[in-house]
Image: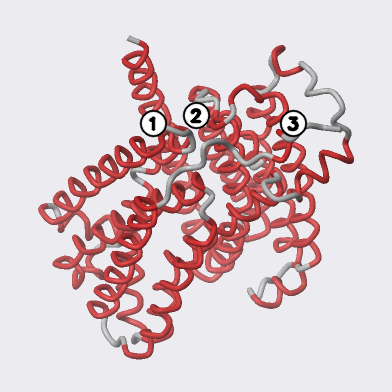
Amino acid sequence: MKGRTTSRQTLRGGALIAVAMAVMNVTTYGFTILAARLLGPAEYGALAAVMGVLLVVNVLSLGLQATGARRVSASPGDLADIEHEVMATSYVSALLLGVLLLGATPLITRTLNLDSWVAAALIAVTVVPLSVMGGQAGILQGERRWGPLASIYLAVGVGRLGFGAVALVLEPHTLGAMIGVSVGAFLPVVVGWLALRHPDRRRAGRPGRTAASAATRRWAPGGVLRETMHNSHALLAFFALSNTDVIVARSTLPAHQAGLYAGGLILTKAVLFLPQFVVVVAFPSMSRQGSGRRMHMLGLAMVLAIGVVTVLGVAVLSSLAVVFIGGPEYAALQGRLWVFAALGTLLAILQLMIYDVVARQHQRMVFVVWAAMAVLLVAAPFLNSVSGLLVTVVSIDAALFVALLLASLRTSRPVETQMVAEAPVP
């Protein structure tokens, strides 16, 4: 009876998160379309470059979320202590990253050829609330509080589209857009703060735990801050791998073919993000002893099923898929769009495998991901067509999936969370 209740709650939670993430992605995409129309190609190119940097540095937020979710799920009885450690780490690491990016403002301005250094500085401003939000979302995800977590996801999309749209109308340039993005980034933090403010969280942690000892534990083996760095490293490796092919296309293919490949990747990224709710719902269970293996395999089956349906849909409705990625100018891709959809499915499966690596804290497997990216870079000079690059990327990603799956099957999950905070305090 209890198992059925848990299953129903998981299904309801999955549906809620799926809807919230769909709204978040649609509103984020809406901001992108609005910016492209209001700014024009040249100015939008600058904004896209700035948002690309923000996407990369946002791996800290994802790392904090994964750390919080894994620890809460693995040791739910220690919620008060874990929440304190995760949020303290979130504030410290967010400020450190913000200061680091602020110091890199001149370099970012020159590299991206920005007209204003303030636009580059706003990356530092934006990353602070986004990182704090990662810690908040991780705690809620680990507790399986799907309603508040869905509210955070909704606030991310609504905040970016709402404040971004107002800023673009008032100041239609890159700086204006980034002001809107920065202000909107604080909305999910407010939602997360309200979600974590209920009475049972005010109980004190274990006696004898001073601020100094907490700071020591964060950096010790198994400490929250060190784990966050490892988790962020794993997610950074995945983001690097999943975005290297467009750089290879730009540097090795003729301009027209590189543009076609980039257009096909619009569909790939849409398919990648489509089953992302499965990762969010499955990850807490993947982090727990006993249910982790079963949930991992169930998650893989769900992602694969969604992907197969999508690939078949693209193959049958390829003419509509061409409209989705940009219209008649991309008609040459129509017969190969199902392969781009298959690549998106493969990347979605790899994303779940990366989260399995995080759940098991099998940190050495991250270097296998970097090795896959290195293979693609080595093969790059020999690729001279869209089809050749596409087949190569699919082959490398498929081989990586097999390697990660074999490692997962051969490695047992940790019996409990490796937390230095569990050691007796003298």
Neighbour class for label 2 at 10 Å: few (<14), some, many (≥20)? many
Direction left: furthest residue: 316
Question: Is residue 308 or residue 42 the one in the foreground?
Answer: 308
Question: Is residue 278 or residue 404 the one in the foreground?
Answer: 404
User: Which amino acid does the dot numbered 3 rest on?
Assistant: His
Direction top: furthest residue: 1
Q: Which label's residue is closer to the chain start, 1 or 3?
A: 1
Look at the image and tell me in which quarter the C terminus lies. top right
Q: Residue at x 65, y 25 (%)?
A: 79
User: Which amino acid does the dot numbered 1 rest on?
Assistant: Val
Q: Residue at x 39, y 48 (%)?
A: 352
- Is label 1 in contact with label 2 (beta carbons under 8 Å)? yes
| Label 3 residue SS | helix
Placement of 278 over or under 248, stated as above or below: above
Count how many numbered circles sit on residues in the image.
Answer: 3
Neighbour class for label 1 at 10 Å: few (<14), some, many (≥20)? some
Identify the residue position indicated by label 2 in the image: 150
| Label 1 residue SS | helix
Q: CA distance from mark 1 to mark 3?
A: 30 Å
Closer to the eye: label 3 or 2: 3
Placement of 284 over or under 327, stated as above or below: above
| Corner quadrant of residue 18 | top left
